[in-house]
Image (cartoon, rainbow, N blue to C red):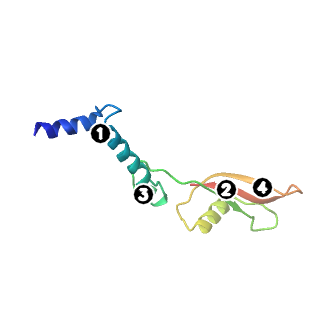
Amino acid sequence: MSSVFRIFKNLFFWSYGRSTWQYDVLCVLILVFVFLTPKAWFDEGELSRRSGHQNDFTASSKLLIAPENSSGDFQARDIERRVREMTNRPDARVKRVREVRGDDGRTVAYEVDIE
C-alpha cells in the first residue's frame, strides 16, 4: 500500500528527473491532453454565458441602424426600440450611440453598442 501511495505522491509532486522514463510518460500525457481535448470543453460561448455561471460575462455587439425618417433624427427610445426589434431580445441595453455622417454632413446611420 505504501508503494502505491509513494507513486501517486511522486506523480503529484513531479519528483522524477528529466532523464527518467516516468518524466517522458508524464510529458506525453500532458501533450495528449493539450492537443486532444475537445475545444467545447473550454469554449466560453454565448450558451455558457447565459447558464448562470459565476463569471457572468455579457456579450457586447455593434449594430448599424438607419434612421426611419428622412430628417435623420432619432430619439434614444427609438434607438432602443429598433435594437430590441433587430436583435429579438427585449432585455437588450444600449451602451453607446455614435452618429455616422454622410459626405453631405447629414446623419445616415447610428452605430450602436449593445449588451
Q: Which residue is mark 1?
A: 22
Q: In terms of sequence position, does the residue under pointer 4 or pointer 2 come before the other?
A: 4
Q: Which residue is mark 3?
A: 38
Q: In terms of sequence position, does the residue under pointer 1 or pointer 4 come before the other?
A: 1
The residue located at (72%, 52%) in the rendering is 98
Q: In terms of sequence position, does the residue under pointer 2 or pointer 3 come before the other?
A: 3
Within 10 angstroms of label 2, few (less than 14), some, or many (20 or more) residues? Answer: some
Q: Quadrant of the C terminus?
A: bottom right
Q: In terms of sequence position, does the residue under pointer 2 or pointer 1 come before the other?
A: 1
The residue located at (20%, 38%) in the rendering is 7
Q: Please tell me whether mark 4 sits on a helix, a strand or a loop.
A: strand
Kindly identify the amino acid type of the residue bearing the numbered disc 1: Gln
Kindly identify the amino acid type of the residue bearing the numbered disc 4: Val
Q: Which residue is mark 4?
A: 100
The residue located at (62%, 67%) in the rendering is 86
Q: In terms of sequence position, does the residue under pointer 1 or pointer 3 come before the other?
A: 1
Disc 4 versus disc 3: nearer the observer: 3
Kindly identify the amino acid type of the residue bearing the numbered disc 3: Pro
Observer-nearest residue: 83 or 74?
83
Q: Please tell me whether mark 3 sits on a helix, a strand or a loop.
A: loop
Q: Is residue 65 left or right of residue 50?
A: right
Where residue 8 sits, quadrant-wise, is top left
Q: Please tell me whether mark 2 sits on a helix, a strand or a loop.
A: strand
Disc 2 versus disc 1: nearer the observer: 1
Residue at the far right in the pictured view: 104
Label for residue 13? Answer: none
